[in-house]
Image (spheres, rainbow, N blue to C red):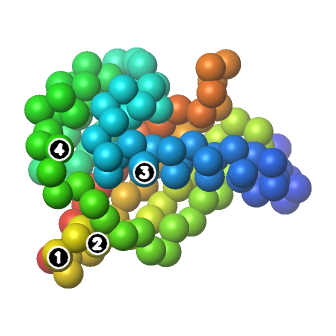
Amino acid sequence: MMIRDDINRPQVVAEVTAAFYRYEDALVNNHIKVLDELFWHDARTVRLGAGENLYGIDDIREFRAARPAAGLQRTLRHTRITTFGEDYAVCSTEFTREGSDAIGRQQQTWVRFPDGWRIVAAQVSLMR
């Protein structure tokens, strides 16, 4: 049973926050190796995007390899990181891309594995 003390333990929040911003840096700088590292390497990993539905790490890798490296800069706002116990977290944020007023939303589910925090599910959407 989850008790209140299990939610947002400072050390766990710090770990997930560091992983989230490492992901964000890799995303805007197109560091594919780091992006790949931060996703769970499993066929059950899911990434639902604004224009693509990717099921499994192989689909995610193919998408990343084919994605243009330009125009990835963005500004985050309303970022929320909530951890549950020692091994589970949800990260939600809104973003705007450079030169656009369109608001995007991103949500990631992170799980702690023996080799570190990994994204097991992610969703990105754009508001028009």
**Residue name at image x 32 percent, y 46 percent:** 29
Alpha carbon of mark 4 to alpha carbon of mark 3: how far?
14 Å
* SS of the residue under disc 4: loop
Q: Amino acid at mark 2?
A: Thr
Alpha carbon of mark 2 to alpha carbon of mark 1: how far?
7 Å
Quadrant in the rendering for residue 54: top left
Q: Are marks 4 and 3 in contact (CB under 8 Å)?
A: no
Q: Which residue is mark 3?
A: 24
Alpha carbon of mark 2 to alpha carbon of mark 4: how far?
17 Å
23, above or below 56, in the image:
below
x, y percentage for residue 44?
Answer: 38, 24
Alpha carbon of mark 1 to alpha carbon of mark 3: how far?
18 Å
x, y percentage for residue 121?
Answer: 41, 39
x, y percentage for residue 98?
Answer: 22, 70
Front label number (4 vs 1):
4
* SS of the residue under disc 1: loop
Q: Which residue is mark 4?
A: 69
Q: Quadrant of the N terminus?
A: top right
Front label number (4 vs 3):
4
Q: Residue furthest bottom?
A: 101
Q: Are marks 2 and 1 in contact (CB under 8 Å)?
A: yes
Q: Which residue is mark 1?
A: 100
x, y percentage for residue 50?
Answer: 18, 55
Looking at the image, tell me whether mark 3 or mark 2 is earlier in sequence order: 3
**Residue name at image x 47 percent, y 32 percent:** 38
Quadrant in the rendering for residue 7: bottom right
**Residue name at image x 65 percent, y 41 percent:** 88
Looking at the image, tell me whether mark 1 or mark 3 is earlier in sequence order: 3
